Image (cartoon, coloured by chain):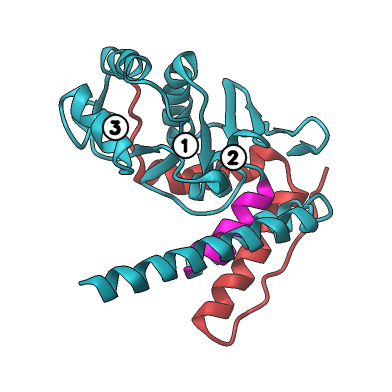
Amino acid sequence: MKEKRIFLKPGRNNREERMNFVEFWAEFVRTHSDKEWSRQQNNLINSLIPDVES
Amino acid sequence: MEYDVEKREIEVCKELSNLDRFALDFVEIVRKHTDYVIISGYVSILLGRSRVTEDIDMFIPKISSDVFFNMYGELEEKGFWCLNTDTNEKAFDYLKEGYAIRFAKKGESIPNFEVKFPKDELDENVFNDFVTVILSKGKIKISCLERNIAFKKYFLGSDKDIEDAHHLEKIFRGKIDYDKLNKVKELINRRKENEREKNFFETRQE
């Protein structure tokens, strides 16, 4: 199934830009599968946090 | 992500990140010894926020030294170390004195768990209305969304905290109890007022 495309509203300054992105991403999380948003989230998290399994 | 408000459960069918696996490993040990609730930034991250943190904040109730020493022993046995000290007595002293102590995997500093005792009734209330997040490989208890949002917006208040709160409000719109959130906000304001008064009198005494 094709998932709904969401558009990011540009901000007039850094703070507004960041807040708009928070809203954009929250909407993405709300409207897409957990597997899809977590795959993208893990690209960020796992690039910075090592796998600490002993 | 499904939030059952009545059951206070959120089911997340996500791919676990290295941070989630670290959290589950730690929680698996702690829960055998005492109650716990995870608060603050990791809550937003667990529920989808697009950022990283190097620490996960956790409240545990004010437990006895015996219970703490058993937990500390098992944490060491299972490959964790305390970043603040290498003795369980000193770690417990820190907690009793109101400090947070941090645990990471042996040989590592990040990610880490920041563990602390609640300092007042407002903190202690996290144990009464926690929410359970159900993941594919275990469960994690988090403070309820209203408390998380109120603390982020009205107590911590940095840009990052406001964004974390905004994320939760957007994700769970229609499911946030704003009466409850406003009550927590009032208690936070009262705490801030008390702290201001205390600082004022302490400054005058110097």
Find the magenta span and give its range: B145-158
A18 with respect to B181 (left or right): left
Residue B14 image-quadrant placement: top right
Percent of width and height locating residue B11: 71, 31
* Residue on which the image places disc 3: B104
Disc 1 or disc 3, which is closer to the eye? 1
Mark 2–mark 1 CB contact (< 8 Å) = yes
B44 with respect to B5 (left or right): left
Secondary structure, mark 3, is: strand
Q: Residue at x 61, y 64 (%)?
A: A22
Percent of width and height locating residue B169: 71, 58
Percent of width and height locating residue B92: 27, 29
Give the residue type that dot 1 points to.
Phe
* Residue on which the image places disc 1: B59
Q: Residue at x 59, y 31 (%)?
A: B141
Compare residues B164 and A32 and report the one nearer the observer.
Answer: B164
Give the residue type that dot 3 points to.
Ala
Is residue B21 visible in this depiction of the protein? yes
Looking at the image, which residue sits at the far front? B205
Examine the residues drawn in magenta and state their main secondary structure: helix
Which shade is chain A? red
Looking at the image, which residue sits at the far bottom? A12
Chain holding disc 1: B
Percent of width and height locating residue A18: 55, 72
Give the distance between the C-alpha atoms of the residues marked 2 and 1, in whole angstroms: 8 Å
Give the distance between the C-alpha atoms of the residues marked 1 and 3, in whole angstroms: 16 Å
**What number is the disc on residue B126?**
2
Is residue B167 visible in this depiction of the protein? no
Q: Residue at x 49, y 33 (%)?
A: B20
